[in-house]
Amino acid sequence: MTNNDVLKKLRVALKLRDDDIVKILELVDFRISKSELGAFFRKEDHPKYMECGDQILRNFLNGLVIHLRGPLPKKISSTTNDEKKSVKKKNDGKKTASKKSETHKTASKKKASNS
């Protein structure tokens, strides 16, 4: 079975028109005209017949996935803004605690030197 046959069978099974296939290919940034596309659906003995390459079929299949499933959701970074804020608050708390202990140490030293 050739790539042209696969493309033809998917076109019929999914009830796609040339416009639909062009739009599906545009989803993966692959531009093709309707006349170029029509050449893939001609009979092999036709003078304007063109063989469908692997790249075109691959791009069509990738575009079809996007068309049927929708685009991929954007990746969320490993730490969200809320997590960053909570980490920052925890770090600020640690700094405050260490400042308090430093203040306590200095106060203790002053008391010791005054005695």
Image (cartoon, rainbow, N blue to C red):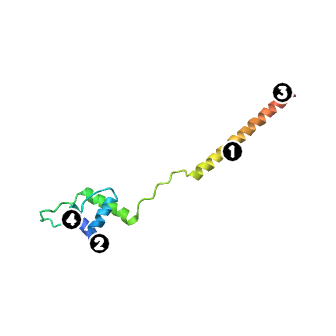
* Amino acid bearing label 1: Gly
Q: Nearer the viewer, mark 4 or mark 1?
A: 4
Quadrant of res 36: bottom left
The furthest residue to the right: 115
Query: Mark 3 near mark 2, Cβ–Cβ under 8 Å?
Result: no
Residue 107 at least partly seen: yes
Q: Which mark is residue 113?
A: 3
Q: Secondary structure beneath disc 1?
A: helix
| Cβ atoms under marks 4 and 3 closer than 8 Å | no
Mark 4 vs mark 3: in front: 4
Whichever of labels 4 and 1 marks the residue nearer the N terminus, that label is 4
Residue 87, image x, y percentages: 62, 47
Residue assigned mark 1:
93
Q: Please, what is the three-letter code of the amino acid marked with disc 4?
A: Gly
Q: What residue lies at 82% left-to-right and 30% top-to-bottom?
A: 110
The reply, left or right, for residue 5 in relation to residue 112 is: left
Foreground tag (2 vs 4): 4
> What amino acid is found at the position of numbered circle 3 in the picture?
Ser
Q: Which of these two is toward me, 20 or 49?
A: 20
Q: How many marks?
A: 4
